[in-house]
């Protein structure tokens, strides 16, 4: 079977749906924890299931260099390699490669491996071939990213090259049991975003990433860009804002019809002692928690909240114990995945606007 998404309910522009893949169905809106090198840092596959993860993301860039796509393929593709039976999405590697100041021409990008300095070439065709070898359920096209702030001309040139690469990517696709989604670019200019979305859709993709957002732009600029993109895309296709994972950002995007998210934020913040919570995000390292017997959140079902006090968690960070980042990673992912579950329930009950206002209201009172 292949990959297909179908809408189930709608509440304003917000919608629920079901993404069917060869490795199971996942309800949307959904959030994908990020397993950069084939592992969500400090967590194993059982942990991810307990957190409520339905689908995870893995990074093509890291896996193509270490251990290499052929090795992953021999070890049972990503699902066997990671022992993750559920759906997996891979990014194309573009985001990481473009952060390394690569040589870019019409053919592709050339960069030096962070591991041994050897030159590596990545073309749209190779990005597809690598992801097909990795065996991810959903692969993403190689897109052209630009540093911010960027002028209109630079943004337009990158967006147009992304379109040409998207066409080459589709032509290179060989696996009918896997999906390849396009990526909409265009910076924070709604006109360019709309052009990119319409042209990417015209190529015939069945799903759409919205790239180049959540890179420091103001929430209002991001929201306008998302609105411009969604207006050009078919209702029947899933929309995925790449690299976004904060509570307010997720709620803003779901309100505009976005179905899928990924972000390193919940686990990266966890490793730095930052807690995501219903009542506002905070640092577990603060001195005021030293003698606190309270859990992070008494209503949270995760092991960090069920068994441990803020005082103990603060101690783990003060003494740099491995368990601290692990417990906060479990909590922050449980928080984010439960947020998605609540969002789906609210949409099904046609109460998304109220849920969103209440969630943001409670968090902003404390913050
Ligand atoms: Zn918790």
Image (cartoon, grey):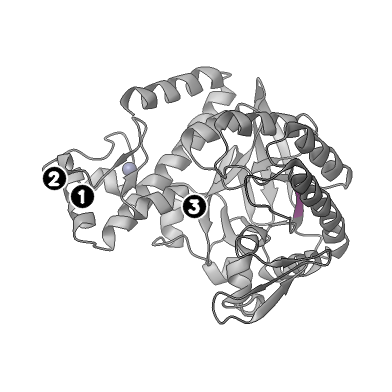
For this view, does 293 lie left or right of residue 46?
A: left
Q: Quadrant of the C terminus?
A: top left
Which residue is at the front of the view, 328 or 153? Answer: 153
State which region is magenta: 180-184
- Residue at 37 percent across and 32 percent down: it is 278
Where is residue 307 drawn, in percent x and y? 22, 47
Can residue 89 be spotted in the picture? yes
Q: What's the mark number on residue 290?
A: 2
Q: Which mark is residue 264?
A: 3
User: At which x and y percent is residue 335?
Assistant: 40, 40
Q: Which residue is mark 1?
A: 314
- N-term-proximal mark, 1 vs 2: 2
In front: 176, or 227? 227
Looking at the image, residue 366 lies above or below residue 67: above
Circle 2 SS class: loop
Q: Residues within 10 Å of mark 2 (few under 14, many from 20)?
A: some
* Mark toward the start of the polypeptide (2 vs 3): 3
Q: Are marks 1 and 2 in contact (CB under 8 Å)?
A: yes
Magenta: main secondary structure equals: strand
Q: From the viewer's perspective, tell me whether residue 168 is left or right of residue 192.
A: right
Quadrant for the N terminus, please.
bottom right
């Amino acid at each position: 079977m292949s990959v297909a998404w179908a809408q189930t309910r709608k509440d304003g522009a917000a919608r629920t749906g079901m993404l069917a893949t060869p490795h199971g169905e996942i309800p949307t809106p959904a959030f994908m924890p990020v397993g950069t090198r084939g592992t969500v840092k400090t967590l194993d596959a059982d942990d991810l299931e307990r957190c409520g993860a339905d689908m995870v993301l893995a990074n093509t860039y890291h896996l193509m260099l270490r251990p290499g796509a052929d090795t992953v393929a021999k070890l049972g593709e990503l699902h066997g390699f990671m022992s993750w039976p559920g759906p997996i999405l891979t990014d194309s590697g573009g985001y990481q490669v473009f952060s390394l100041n690569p040589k870019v021409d019409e053919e592709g990008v050339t960069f030096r491996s962070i591991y041994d300095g050897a030159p590596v070439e990545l073309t749209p065709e190779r990005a597809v071939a690598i992801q097909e070898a990795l065996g991810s359920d959903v692969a993403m096209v190689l897109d052209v990213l630009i540093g911010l702030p960027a002028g209109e001309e630079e943004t337009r040139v990158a967006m147009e090259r992304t379109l040409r690469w998207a066409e080459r990517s589709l032509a290179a696709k060989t696996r009918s049991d896997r999906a390849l989604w396009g990526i909409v670019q265009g910076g924070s200019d709604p006109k360019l975003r709309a052009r990119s979305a319409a042209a990417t859709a015209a190529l015939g993709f069945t799903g759409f990433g919205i790239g180049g957002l959540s890179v420091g732009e103001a929430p209002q600029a991001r929201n306008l860009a998302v609105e411009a993109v969604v207006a050009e895309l078919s209702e029947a296709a899933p929309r995925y804002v790449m690299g976004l994972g904060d509570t307010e950002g997720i709620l803003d995007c779901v309100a505009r019809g976005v179905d899928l998210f990924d972000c390193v934020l919940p686990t990266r913040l966890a490793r730095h002692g930052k807690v995501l919570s219903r009542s506002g995000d905070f640092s577990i390292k603060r001195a005021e928690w030293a003698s606190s017997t309270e859990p992070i959140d008494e209503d949270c079902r995760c092991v960090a909240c069920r068994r441990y006090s803020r005082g103990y968690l603060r101690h783990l960070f003060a003494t740099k114990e491995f368990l601290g980042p692990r417990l906060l990673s479990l909590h922050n992912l449980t928080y984010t995945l439960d947020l998605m579950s609540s969002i789906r329930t609210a949409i099904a009950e046609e109460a998304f606007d109220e849920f969103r206002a209440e969630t943001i209201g409670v968090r902003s009172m404390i913050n």
